[in-house]
Amino acid sequence: MSSPRSNKPKIVNGPGGYMLQDVPHLIDYLPDLPTYPNPLQDNPAYSVVKQYFVDADDSVPEKVVVHKDGPRGIHFRRAGPRQKVYFESDEVHACIVTCGGLCPGLNTVIREIVSSLSYMYGVKRILGIDGGYRGFYAKNTIPLNSKVVNDIHKRGGTILGTSRGGHDTTKIVDSIQDRGINQVYIIGGDGTQRGASVIFEEIRRRGLKVAVVGIPKTIDNDIPVIDKSFGFDTAVEEAQRAINAAHVEAESNENGIGFVKLMGRYSGFIAMYATLASRDVDCCLIPESPFYLEGEGGLFEFIERRLKENGHMVIVLAEGAGQDLMCKSMDSTLKDASGNKLLKDVGLWLSQSIKDYFNKNKMVMNLKYIDPTYMIRAVPSNASDNVYCTLLAQSAVHGAMAGYTGYTSGLVNGRQTYIPYYRITETQNNVVITDRMWARLLSSTNQPSFLGPKDISEEKKELPETPLLDDGAVDIPPVTKEVTK
Ligand SMILES: Nc1ncnc2c1ncn2[C@@H]1O[C@H](COP(=O)(O)OP(=O)(O)O)[C@@H](O)[C@H]1O
Ligand SMILES: O=P(O)(O)OC[C@H]1O[C@](O)(COP(=O)(O)O)[C@@H](O)[C@@H]1O
Ligand SMILES: [Mg+2]
């Protein structure tokens, strides 16, 4: 067990190879904090629920598929309300911030944090931080209550605004301290969770009674450990509209190609799931799966063959795919304000390359390029994402009220959990092209893998599985690929 104020991971080992990767608690560095009965015990809506409070020993396994003689493996603390809380209702001064790119469901998460705090725990003081991390020190705050957030879940985007860059730990923690904020809810992707982790470390170093809670947001689904990120289903659904349009255009023209570019900087999950859902896609190109254009087994040959067979085709491309194939003279070292690599527009480049190839070979071809990039993340979340966001927000609030801190609230194997930051920030979730899910995609599109046997064995060595949902892959340990920015 770690000592007070130590930033070593809290690990609890148990029999049969059980390991709990626990999250920090305020009493790790403030051991004398008083506790109070959870006000939920008097809430008429919850008092009828048997065993409503989560048992202190409940934990959730990271892997549900185990071998008979294998170890019990890594577990995370189960999320949910506790018998005792470490904050009195009128003591709580909470704030919420949204950072990074947009994602469907942001407003729902904001709404449900506000509702959980006010309706479940009687909290009255909740602030919205305007425009991401820099809003802590460079902008005014937005007072939030259940009335203000009442119908925001029907809108896309975030009512709080968002931004990249601007993470100044000292200024942010100074602002938290000066305003007397004691619960900080930080909604954002991998970069944001890294930022939350350093904010938590600084708060612990200063010995403040402040719970720091991350809520994972990523349209790209590139956050590890969690089953999937909120808004992902909505984005995949929205992408169907573009793919349908591409199919209609392709079918109606001689040698028609419908070409759709989707988001996915390093991870091709949106493209993969949109393709699998659609069944109209002939070829899906993602960052994790290298491909080449010319010659035998290349993309051009495949397109030509598919057009000859079917008279039309649909291509889905994730924006991070094929970046290496593009003109070397273009500056590929440019970064955005958060340090993420700025991508070149591979969609325009590849569609032009395909046109050039068919012109050169004097073949008729009609390519229609559709770029719905921002449309799929700017829409409001769908019904199932709304429910998901609600549970996520409630879990985040229960954890902070119970004194946990320095964690990301996330769904693991269908259960809400508290995950220590280091597990969220150490790796990135990627499509593993030697997994069954990618094989399912290849078999549904009947596209070539563009890989030789050597590439496959290299890939197998490097990339064990990281499923979005249960992909049936049981025999490879859960390690993800490290991606440098
Ligand atoms: N390593 C880091 N340490 C501290 N803050 C970071 C770090 N990486 C990113 N951030 C901050 O997190 C916020 C969001 O990051 P970004 O990468 O743009 O989006 P996302 O959180 O969606 O990945 C930005 O304000 C950025 O400055
Ligand atoms: O133009 P922006 O706002 O930087 O967003 C573009 C990027 O945002 C993403 O949708 C997601 O990135 P984040 O998870 O960092 O928000 C990427 O797929 C895309 O490259
Ligand atoms: Mg990111």
Image: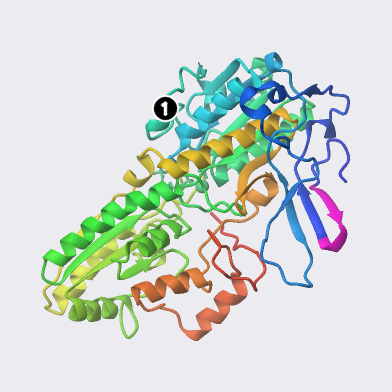
Numbered disc 1: secondary structure? helix
Position of residue 292 measured from the top left corner of the image (x, y, whole percent): 36, 75
| Depth order, front residue of 326/227 | 227
Numbered-mark total: 1
**Residue 460 location in percent, x, y?**
58, 76
Q: How is the image coloured?
A: rainbow
Q: Quadrant of residue 188?
A: top right
Give the residue drawn at x 73%, y 37%. 51
Q: How would you rate the neighbour count of disc 1 (Cα within 10 Å): few for under 14, some for 14-19, many for 20 or more?
A: some
Instruction: Give the residue displayed 41% in from the left and 62% down from the top.
Output: 272
> Does the rendering let one see residue 163?
no
Of residues 428 and 235, the one drawn nearer to the viewer in this rendering: 235
Reply yes or no: does residue 10 show up in magenta: yes
Say which residue appears at 36% left-offset and 40% top-offset. 378
Q: Is residue 259 above or below residue 161?
A: below
Position of 64 with respect to 434 (left or right) is right
Q: Amino acid at mark 1?
A: Ile
Apparent side of residue 261 relative to residue 255 in the rendered image (left or right)? right
Q: Which residue is mark 1?
A: 152
What is the magenta range? 9-17
Residue for point 53% across, 59% down? 469
